[in-house]
Image (cartoon, rainbow, N blue to C red):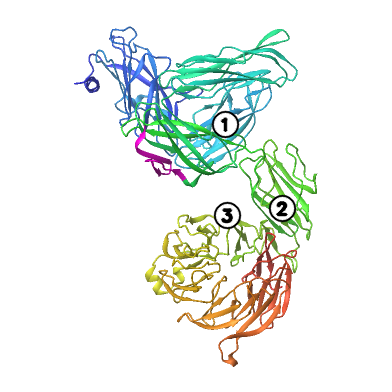
Amino acid sequence: MNVRILALAAVLLPAVGFSQTWTARPIPATGETVARVVMGDANELVVEVTNTTAATRDSRVSEVSFVLPNGYQLLGGLPAEENPNWKVDYIEANERRITFQSTLGCVDDGRGLARNESARFVLSVVPPAGGTDSATERMAAGTYARDQCDGTNYTFNVNNMPPWTRAILAANVTLSPRVLAVNGTTVARVVVENRGTSSATVAVDNPASTTSVPLTTVSKDGNKSVAVRSAGVFVANLRPTAAGAVAARVRARTTNNASNAPLADSNMADVGNLVASADMDVVDAFSGDQVTLRLIVLNASTANTYTQVRPRAPVLLGRATATLVSGPSPESVAQLAPGASAQFTWRYQVSGSPGASYQFQAQVDGTLNGSSVAGDAVTARKGRIVEHRVRLSQETVSTAATGVTVAYTVQNRGTLPIYMVTLFKPAVNYFSVAASGPQPFGDWAVSTDATGYSWESETGIPVGGEATFRIAYSGFTAVTADTAFRHRLELNQGWNDPRIRVEATMTLLAVTASPDVERLTGVARDGSVTLTWDNPFNHGGTLVLRAEGTRPTTAPTSGVRYAVGDTVGNATVAYTDEFSSASSFTDTAVTNGTTYVYRVFNADDQLRYGPGNQPTSQGLLATPRARVAGNPLWCYSVGLASRHQPVTELGVGIFSSYNDSIVGSLTNTVNPSVDGAERFRPVKLPGSIGSRFPVVPLLGRPGQQWLVVGDQTGVPAVLNAATGEFLWRNTTLGLGNISSFPVTQLLDYANPEYRTTYSNVDLAIFATRNPSAQQNQVVALNAATGELIWRYRPGDLGMVSGGMLVDYATNRLYVPTKSGASAATLRVLNSLTGAEVARLALGDLEFGVVRNATSNQILVTANDGNVHGVNPTTFTRVWTVAVRTNLSPAFTHFARPQGRGFVVTTEDNRIERYEVVEANGTGVPELLWSQPVAARPTGLFTLNLNGSVRVYVGAADGKVHQFDLETGNETGQVTVGPAQRIGVPTVDHTVGRLHVGTEDGRICAFPVPF
């Protein structure tokens, strides 16, 4: 029987002689009342063991063995530095057991622990995740102590052990600047990471001083919601009111006090006149590496000049060995004038066993007016001797950077190869991983889960070797000042071996100016303009400039405080605040009929202003108007062209888009002050939105409406019309450019054949506008999930720009295309399967296909000036009307069905109505009337009011024109803005309103008829 089996057997056998007792208790960190560890993080759990036996035997505790609770991961351990005569005897990672033995033999004095003696052990552990803090963590059964010499067992009930706390929050804090005068200001930046299983609302208590130097909290960030695997960054402005070295000790907690992060101490700051800060370049050294210690000295006084400034020899703290290689360099500085600084460096070679720490304390001396002056002793951060570490290719990165590939080089100086490397996701709200993400190489395969990215190899990283793992980041979230975030990795030497944790920091750099506000919009009403924006992360206040008729041309000066009414160039300060979270402002100091241009500048806590270029550098245009005939009820400004036809949810509101964003406005006929207000903040898609989109109900979601949208990067999506939240987005289809109107086929309105095929599915159908006919396709997706149902990609499909048509009665889908690889530009598909039913050669088709409900014919508008009628049964062309010849393009929009004919707008500035004349018996629509439109008309919309039908069309003269359908006479018009292209109007007949978008970035509502 070997020694290990003997030892385990001794645990199970009855104790020899009298029962002996011992205690084990977790040791709280300085300032804590209980020991704390963080879920999912590598932690140092310090356990103190005491021999509490009665004085009846001479047995000593010379072996202790700890078993961690279920779910814990054991990384390793060391005896505490104050009791070096112990060693780790063995580790069983799968059993979560670590055993320590005295290094002194049975006949050596001082072996183990005599009665009432204690020793401390540092366990490296990774606790499991949970919903909230657990305050009842104790060692598991199997924990024991014994005298390895005489076999005496020491009894211990683990349930009597004082518990430690397993926390969901981790925090670290930095101070900047670290050298300052008394009553100066330093900023504590606290990065709080959520390692739990759900979002947490987090607060940071006022930082406390670790020394006799008082720290006054001048201001501090309020509560923040921190999602799982995310980080919250909290800022506290501190004022030290006495001289001396000090660190800030910070507690982060949930606002309900259910969870507390372990106390975190900042780096050391020095306050006074002759002040210094110490730092070290390497804190994870291999034994034999060289490290550099740096001491920066500042004369913070305004009058004193110090001479003969020289550093003392640094003092080494810790159990590692440090051999001076060179330094200090320089040896001294002859003079240090007010505000001047000096830098001293040393080079050391460090060595020791893995886990041994090294830390340096430094101090400076000088002479003032002939008398010696000593600075404060300051310490650099602590380093350790390691066997494994990681190096980052970018230790700092600008938050303005995009598409950055970071290389993580893992170096192995251990005793076994490394076969698996896992990068835990760094704060996901600050580091956005690109679609390409982690990159495989060699025989290293990549896998991804919710927590991180893993590389696995059969050959691994050999002892003494290294390997580089790369991951692409698409972008980084802005920070208010340089902020360091941890990047943590786990290394696996084998499934039965303890895991290894290594980490490094990547610092996100703040830009020189504060970032802009985002998603700036405005609503102009009678006597007011309401601006709304999103504050960026780096936000302290907002400044709004307003100019009449033109953009504000002069930016505010950073560091300058402005008041409402101040003049800045050609503009007036309309609004300003500081230390505010306000994101909306209603300007009532405006005159109806006057056009204003606004620029909104974000300011940080240091009064650095952003560029003010949202939505563009041209600012946001708004014209308040009285609610009288001919004027809009409201205009919603987005700052970028918004000429897509608005989509109406009758009596409730409208939806539209600009660039890459979807917007929604409310219809309120009772309260003018909220009429036209946003339903939700603009929702961004990955790319520009090329057409209007449908708003529809979906199966199983009564009382809700949904927006079916595609963008020009090929991402289809469905959004909640009330909240703007995505139901789903499908980024995996590889569609390319979606620029046409998506269509839906809904079960609630479907025929029996559809219901037989799809008993519980609505279809959302998208088509593409790619240059290559081989790439163009039509896809039908499950409207509730985005799952692919069918795909039509024949290889000769031209670009689809206009809207498709679903014929519910026949389950047929009509797809208009441009000619390309095939002259067959109208494809007819089975909407249930995507199978092609027919194809017709009708010339280039860039406008939507529509159905005339009266004639039951499909109307197809061709670029060459022809409008075709297609039989939906035989799929043959019934008639063709040559609206224009020798004019290309001929139309500005598709022919809208009316009666048994259609109404159309043409590129030569006409609006015309065609109708079947029964007396002629041809069945072909004939021209009834033709009227000029002032300038390039857009598409049109009709309103039937008490049997009187009016036609509305926008034009490039900045107006919407109203025509009588029967006579063609223009019976009214309204001016939306100065001469510019006006979009296709839509009419909400339930409330008598017309909505239309403009080139200058507005969406306006008018009462109809004019």
Residue at 63% across, 57% down: 678
Instruction: Note whether 655 is above or below 401 in the view shown.
Output: below
Tell me how far mark 2 sits from mark 1, CA to CA: 43 Å
Q: Residue furthest front?
A: 821
Residue type, numbered disc 2: Gln
Between disc 2 and disc 3, the foreground one is: 2
Element type where label 2 sits in the image: loop
The reply to whether discs 3 and 1 touch (Cβ–Cβ < 8 Å) is no
| Camera-side mark, 2 or 1 | 2
In terms of sequence position, does the residue under pointer 2 or pointer 3 come before the other? 2
Prevailing secondary structure of the magenta residues = strand
- Res 492 → quadrant: top left
Which of the labelled discs sits on residue 282, or is there none? none
Q: Which mark is residue 618?
A: 2
Residue 664 x, y percent position in the rendering: 60, 59
The residue indicated by pointer 1 is 205
Which three-letter amino acid code belongs to the residue tagged 3? Val
Which region of the structure is painted magenta? 437-461
Q: Is 827 on the left-hand or right-hand side of 628?
A: left
Q: Which of pointers 2 and 1 lies earlier in the amino acid sequence? A: 1
Image coords of residue 387 (percent x, y):
41, 25
Q: Is residue 648 left or right of residue 872?
A: right
Tell me which amino acid carries mark 1: Asp
Name the residue rendered at 47%, 21% in the picture.
Answer: 289
Circle 1 crowding by C-alpha within 10 Å: few under 14, some 14–19, many from 20: some
Camera-side residue of 667 and 340: 340
Where is residue 292, by image quadrant?
top right
Few, some or many residues within 10 Å of mark 2 (<14, 14–19, 20+):
some
Q: Is 456 one of the magenta-colored residues?
A: yes
Q: Quadrant of the N terminus?
A: top left
Residue, disc 3: 683
